[in-house]
Each structure stands twice: as structure tokens, then as C-alpha cells.
Image (cartoon, grey):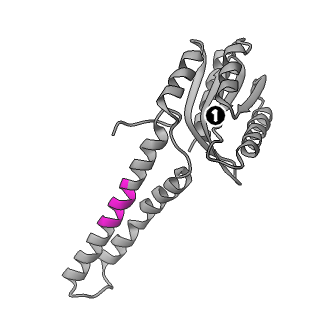
Amino acid sequence: MKFKGRCEYGHIRYEKTRSLLVVLLTIALGLAVFALGLLLNKGDKKNIFSVIAMLFVIPMSLRLVRLIVLLPFHTPNRDIYERVQASLGPEDLLFSDFVFTNGQNAFGLSFLALCGSNLYGFFEISKDKKGKEKAAKAQFYFKDTFQRRGMQIKQCCICTEEKDFLKKIKECDKTPLAEEDKKAVREFLISLAV
């Protein structure tokens, strides 16, 4: 299993697998330590091994929360990823498997592209009945957040159709952001991702 960082293609699949393995491993280790404590203390539960076993709950719960957040989302198909990658210019940034939360909802964008000073997202709604509503909320969240932070994003649009997304990427104004602004936007977007 090769490491996939946040916003890289395959990150959701990688994190689901990793989180599941960590959850199962910490449960097994916690039970093993607890059983060892029972064995060494002749069945008495009041021992230091019980306390140590309970401490395994902390990393397990952190990973379990991450797994629960990521469960409804999936890594997009490889062929869609390659079509999007081919549509981007050399200066454009692509964020894939972009899952973020805003306090009330968790959003999963298949792709988020920074093209010049424009931000475009692709939200697959095939399996989500409230997809258009969520896409509108995500778009509002990005616009509002960038405006409050004073970041120079000209246009922000979350598309629910692949063809619309690809069209916007190809036809957008490619006026580049200043390098420091581009870096700030990139770091901010990565910090948002789960």
C-alpha cells in the first residue's frame, strides 16, 4: 500500500484501508494486553494492564472517526482523472479526492482545479440525491472563505457534470496568480482536506 497524501489521486481509498487496519490492529492489541493482564493477575481486572489496554481506545477512536467521515466518498475512476489531468495547463494545480467539512456537512469533491486565478470543482452526484444542493453549499463555502481571507480568486464554481467541469478548465482565463498567492491558496486547500 503506497502512501497517498491529502489531495492526491487515490487518497480516499488509501485512507479507508489504512484507517480500517489501524482500528482492527488497536482493538486486537488492546484485547491482547487486557488478556495478558488477566492472565498475570489471576483474573483480577484491577491492574495496570487494564489501564494500558484502555489507552488503545484513543488512537482507535481517532482513526474510526476518520473512517466514518470518509466512508460515503470514493476515489474517482482513473480514466476521468487522466482526462482531467490532460485538460490542465502546466501552471494549473489539481487536487483529487478532496474531502472537507465545514461544521455542518462533509463534502467530497472528486476534483478541485486551480486554473490561473479561478477555482473549479467537480462533484459527482450520481449516488447523492442532494448532490446539486451540496455542490451549491460547497461553492458558497469556498467563495465566502476566500473572500474572508482576502485571497485573490476571481471565479469559484463547483460543477456537477464532468463535461461542464472540463469545459470550464479549458476555457477559463489563465491569468496566473502571483507565486506567493498560489502557494497560499494551495496550502489553505490542503489544510481543509480530511
Query: In the drawing, does residue 74 fall left or right of residue 192?
Result: left
Residue at the image position 63 percent from the left and 34 percent from the top: 188
- Mark count: 1
Q: Which of the two residues, 162 or 23, is positioned nearer the viewer here?
A: 162
Taking the magenta stretch, the answer to whether it contains residue 54 is no
User: Judging from the image, what secondary structure is the residue with disc 1 in?
Assistant: helix
- The reply to whether residue 153 is in sight is yes
Residue at the image position 42 percent from the left and 67 percent from the top: 57
- Image height check: is 44 above or below 59? below
Residue at the image position 53 percent from the left and 34 percent from the top: 7
- The reply to whether residue 184 is in sight is no
Rendering coords of residue 109 (x, y %) = 62, 38
Taking the magenta stretch, the answer to whether it contains residue 25 is yes
Rendering coords of residue 96 (x, y %) = 55, 32
Rendering coords of residue 133 (x, y %) = 76, 45
Rendering coords of residue 12 (x, y %) = 49, 42
Query: In the drawing, does residue 55 fall left or right of residue 76?
Result: left
Residue at the image position 40 percent from the left and 48 percent from the top: 17
Label 1 belongs to which residue?
Answer: 188
Q: Which of the two residues, 112 or 3, is positioned nearer the viewer here?
A: 112
**Magenta residues, start to end:** 21-29
- Image height check: is 187 above or below 26? above
